[in-house]
Amino acid sequence: MERHQNRETRTPRNNVVVHRRRKSKSYRLSYRSGLGAADSRLGWSPALTARRLNTSRKAAGISNIAERVDPGQLALLVKTEWQLSYVTPLHQFRHTQLKSYARQLSAFIAAGKQQGLAVEVEGLQTTFRVSFSLVQGMTQSDEDAESVLVQIHSKRLFARQDEPQKPVWSGWLTCINGNPDYLRALPKDFVCLPLFGCSGADGLSALVKSWFQQSFDCCFGLLEISHTSLQWLMALWTNCHAESGIQHLKMIWTLPATPPLQVTYTVDPEDAWELWSSVRKGKGGGGGGEEEEEEAGENYIDIEEVTSFMQGLKSHFYRHFRLDLSAGSLNQVSTALGSAKYSGRMKVPSTRELCQMLSVFALLIFVNVLFFFFSDLQQPIHDHHPDAADRVRPPQNAHLIERIQTLMPPENTIAAFIWQKLLQLVLVFIRNEAKHYLSLIFNIK
Amino acid sequence: MDDSAKRLLQRLMRRIPTPTLRSALEKWGRLTTEQQKSMDFTQSKWALTERLLGICEENELAVKQLTDLEMIHVIDNPDQGMWYAFQLMDPEDDAKSVDLTQFKEQFKSHLRELVRNVSIKMKKHTDEAVWIRIAWGDTFSRPNHLKPTYIVHYLQTPYVFVTSITSKQKPLLSQALVLSTRYQAIKDANLSGRKLTAIRDLLMKKYQQVFPTKYPIPPPENNQTISNQHIEKEQAELAANRLQMACEAFGGGMLPQLQSAVYKLETKFRDHSNKTMTEREEPFRCVVKFTSTNLLESFRHCASSGIASTPVTPLLSCIPLKGRNYFLITDNGPGPSSQRGQPQV
């Protein structure tokens, strides 16, 4: 473990920096505050100096996935509200054995029902038919595993014989735009499909999850979409307004009064777009800076722009009502391009936005899982700088970074090798200790 | 019993929950004692409906008597459906002297002039409220008793509360009301809610108001353990001030249970840190909706706990002050500091 103390948290390949956060008493709090800066996957940090901790994200959509996937399957995915969970990698999951999995799962559900486990689906027959189908094409890179769609069909209790069975529960597992280093570091037997969405009766969801847990030795956990992620989504959607109108930007906040007060703040799309354009740092309007930054700038959105956007909306609200929205929590963000709730529910009305949303959520998971293990490393680093009191902005312990840098060889190969080893260790760690640690950090119920 | 009466009865039975059914039937008084005893209220609703249908056939009851039952139920349970408040404007000289009989006659005759086939039922309730039930028809069709409009008017006040009315029916009703109450116009009071009692209390100020006093009200007792004497001492006065201002704005004691308030904002965006938006000419349009199980209570708590800065902004304290919960806010007046414009109706 001593090696970990000296590890710097910098991936050599694309120079993503996982920023350090103060480890507060509650894991949950630290995770939440860290997520905002930590999920800067596609952005790069050209220099690890204190002033330019660039956390940015690619704004352009992932367009051609929609063309590659069968439209019938895509139609099943849009216009439904999905409850999202993350899944740890599946052990010995084979895409070729889907039919056998379907049989096993339906037997499992039947057994569960006999035992009296809660499958309180009203007015349905006991026979469920399960289907596993491959959703081909819903991937971004070659490393991503193919997505799988699970459906449970059943008939109503007094239905006629010839009436077809309707799907009463649907779920899917997907991996879009996974972190390539992570995926390559996975041992051979594991398939990474980290994002799970389900819609339907809770009893059936629980049964399906427990079957997966038993069969593939994985772990499920509810994916809470943090406040920062909701803000990112808001900004990303507003950014798309020029191409495809968002029709409105709606936010739902909850303020902790007795009784709780809910605030629905809907902004006209044109005005939201103008506010968003005004906070973008002179992109497209001629800004200074180095050439490489300008080129990349148009497609990249900084976290600072997102927070300024949010701050503008909050201050407009405060000016009128003298109510500080920061005292409450942001629960839901929705536009015509999709909606996302804090509890991990999302809904996408059309296929174009689907893949973008999914990749955002897949990213969330990678960061969630990796973040925890880095938080172990962060404590000694952070202890070195106890006066970094601000939880929102990353602590500026630049010279500490430089010190660590001198310890590590700059060549990619060795660092990459160590990175891979670390990830493997992480994976084994997850498998063995997953439930305990993940429940600590994610507060699994 | 004809089909329409049967359908009305079935609909009524669906609306009236079993616990309140017994008292409603007793008040109705159309069942003999044996018939009343024969109704077994532990049975399912469907069985009860069948039994009641049978009884009504025996007694040869028609739509007219069934609407009595519906009215009894609605009067006893007014907190269902969406109620909208209206206010009569510009009273004539004899508006104050309109009494119940005069109002009833005038209303019926005026409405019958305006609408061919209409069924009106009026009833006076104990607290000076006149309840009116209207089933609308037209030249070609009989009154539709499945979608009645209910109106509550408090005599001697200019307030009228209406539920379940369509936009086509509204002008007819307004006309009839205006003529029969001897006012000149009627306008939307911009107040709506699910509970009639709540919006009535709010509009007619039937709740405990708190007026500014020189001496602060001590904060209510709570059983928290005092963590730090110094903090408590320091904060006590501030807390007391906040509580006083909160109560002045929203009232003390029990507050009417309003569920929502909607503000349509069309004011300019002003923020020092954002020059582009501040220089913009057009207003920043947004709609803010506050919802809660008891909205005024939430606001009062926000103000007393510091989530809302005190003194409470006039936008929020306007709700109890003016008795409305729909506002359109625009920039008005010459000065740049005026945010609160004349709400347009």
Image (tube, coloured by chain):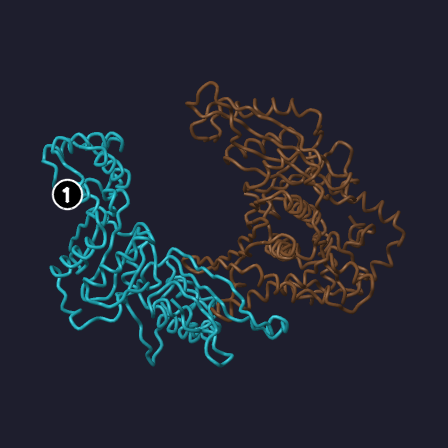
Position of A147 compared to B66: left or right? right
B216 or B159: which is nearer to us? B159
A401 or B137: which is nearer to us? B137
Residue under label 1: B28
Q: Where residue B263 appears, x then y in whole percent? A: 44, 64
The image quadrant of residue A32 is bottom right
Q: The cyan chain is which one?
A: B
- Disc 1 marks a residue whose amino acid type is Trp
How many marks the image carries: the answer is: 1
* Above/below status of B18 relative to B236: above
* SS of the residue under disc 1: helix
* Above/below status of B329 relative to B111: below
Give the quadrant of the C terminus of chain A.
top right
The image quadrant of residue B15 is top left
Position of B28 compared to A355: left or right? left
Q: Where residue A354 appears, x then y in whole percent? A: 63, 44
Which chain is disc 1 placed on? B
The image quadrant of residue A298 is bottom right
Q: The brown chain is which one?
A: A
Q: Where residue A184 appears, x then y in whole percent? A: 79, 40
User: What residue occupies the far front of the structure in this picture?
Assistant: B139
